[in-house]
Every structure is written in structure tokens, then in C-alpha cells.
Amino acid sequence: MRNHLGLFATATRFTVIEHARNRFAMVLIALFIPLWITLAYLVMPDTGAQLRLRATGELITAPGNELTEISGALNAVTLIAGFMMFAATFNGGDFDRRLAMAGYPRTYLVLAKVTALALVSAAVAGYATAVICMTWEPRRPFLLAGALFCAAVTYGVLGVGFGSVLRREVEGMFAIVMTSIIDLGLQNPITSSGADSPITRYLPSYGAMQASTAAGFSVIAVPQYLGVQLVWFAGSALVCLLAFHHRTRNALPAASRSMPRQAPPGDRAAAQNDDDRAASC
């Protein structure tokens, strides 16, 4: 049991150190989240906007700047979580493969990444919720924080998947940014007239958007939509697990792995001479 905990702790320490070295991500967390959320609140008009919340079926009228602030918070946490996990996977992929080929259990490498993702997502979700509560008071701030957390972990595993299959860093960053923009832009009732379209339920952050909007403005709590969001997380995690397993596999032929290593010709000749001298004695 102690050996298992030691393997998990070692892998988690390596993963956390990798995230801590990403200074650009630390700057994004410290500055981008409050800047984006605050600008959305100050710049957008506070005129009431009507939307039909599909989670409860009720017609809600909410200030436009507060609606945009929730959408901006979701956009910020998904971008940061996706970026951090992509960077850690992309830059540490060779290291993970060497560890796996050396015999380090891949199970602990995966659990370490999940633990780091949970820590990062909890931090950015709590921070974004605190910034929102400084400008206005949502009805259920804890449900709002839960929705932001679930959206962050979903995009975090998407970042792991992009980091495992894409070969260039710019490709992964573009994929994360465009996925978040399309996903959340179509669900924002201020910028999209089709925000209540049935098609939006198939978008990656649909459950988080419904839960966070209800947490901000509805008298009805919909924590079950966090479960809807976690379905996206589970599906993405399964795909990313397969991609990670493929990337860290031993690519050497089976014959090469089972064949004993032969000594160089010079070493074989010296060994033969030693054997001959031993036989003559």
C-alpha cells in the first residue's frame, strides 16, 4: 500500500511542478480572469434580456452584463484549464513515455494528471466565482462555482487529448480557443439569438451553462445539470485515456523487446579468451 501511495505521490509531484513552471498560465489566472469578467460587467449594457432557460423551462429576464459575465467566466476557466493541461501534456509527453517504457505504472501517471486537473479547476473556478460575487450576488454561488469547476475539468481533459494527438503547439492552442469560442458563443443569449436552440444541448459546456445561469438568476436549483456536464467529462476522459495509452506505448517490435542484448564484438572476444584460459587451467 505504501508503495502505491509513493508512486502516486511522485507522479503527482512531477505534474504539479510542471504546472507551477508554466508562468504564463499563472499570469493568466491572476490577470485574465478578473479582467475579462470585470470588463464584461462594465462594458455590456445592463438592459434586461429575456431567455428561456431549458433546464427549468422558465422565461428569465436578467441584466445583459451579468449574463455576459457568467459566459465570460466560463470562457476564462475553460481556456485556462485547457491551456494548462495541453501545455503539460505536450511538453511532458516524452517524459511520460520514457517513464512508462522504464516500467513506471501508467495508472499512476493518469491519476496524477487527474489530481492536478482537479486542483487547477478548483482554483480557477473558486477565483472566478469570487470575482463575480464582487460585482453582483448570484442566487446560488456554490452551484455557480460547481458549474465553473465542471466546465474547467471538461476542457482540461480536452487539453490532454489535444496534447496527446497534435504535433505542434500552435495547433493545440488554436483547437482549444476555437472550441471554447464556438461552444460558449452559441450559448450566450446576448450574442446569439439561437441560444435556446435544441442543438446547443450537444455542446461541451451545455450542462455548465444551464447550471450557472440557473445559479445566477433562477429560483429553481438544477444541480442535475452538473451531472450532464460530467457526462461530457467522462466521454472526453475516455478518449484522452486511449490517446495517452497509445502515446506512451512501447513502440519497439516485440522481437526486439524479448531478444537479449548482445555484447559488442570486442567484449565477446575477451569473454571467449577468459573461458579458454579457465578451461586450460
Image: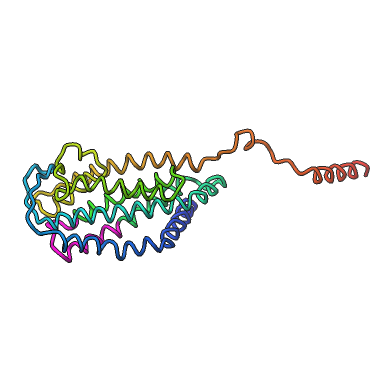
Residue positioned most to the top: 255
How is the protein colored in the picture? Answer: rainbow
Front-lying residue, 71 or 178: 178
Specify the principal SS of the magenta part: helix
Residue 62, horizontal then vertical, whole percent: 8, 54
As for residue 97 lying within the magenta part, the answer is no
268 vs 195, left or right, is right
Residue 53 appears in which quarter of the rendering? top left
Compared to 87, does 107 lie above or below? Answer: above
Residue 240 in percent (x, y) is at 39, 42
Residue 178 lies left or right of residue 133; in this view the side is right
Q: Residue sitting at 29 percent across and 57 percent down?
A: 122
- The quadrant in which the C terminus is found is top right
Examine the structure image and report whether residue 136 is included in the region drawn in magenta.
yes
Picture coordinates of residue 256 (x, y %)? 64, 36
Count the marks.
0
Q: Position of residue 143 (x, y in %)?
A: 18, 53
Q: Closer to the camera, 19 or 2?
A: 19
| Residue 82 appears left or right of 99 | left
Residue interval drawn in magenta:
122-142
The one of 155 and 110 positioned closer to us in this rendering: 155
Where on the picture, by quarter, is residue 33? Answer: bottom left
Q: Residue at x 73, y 40 (%)?
A: 262
State the residue at coordinates (9%, 59%). Answer: 46
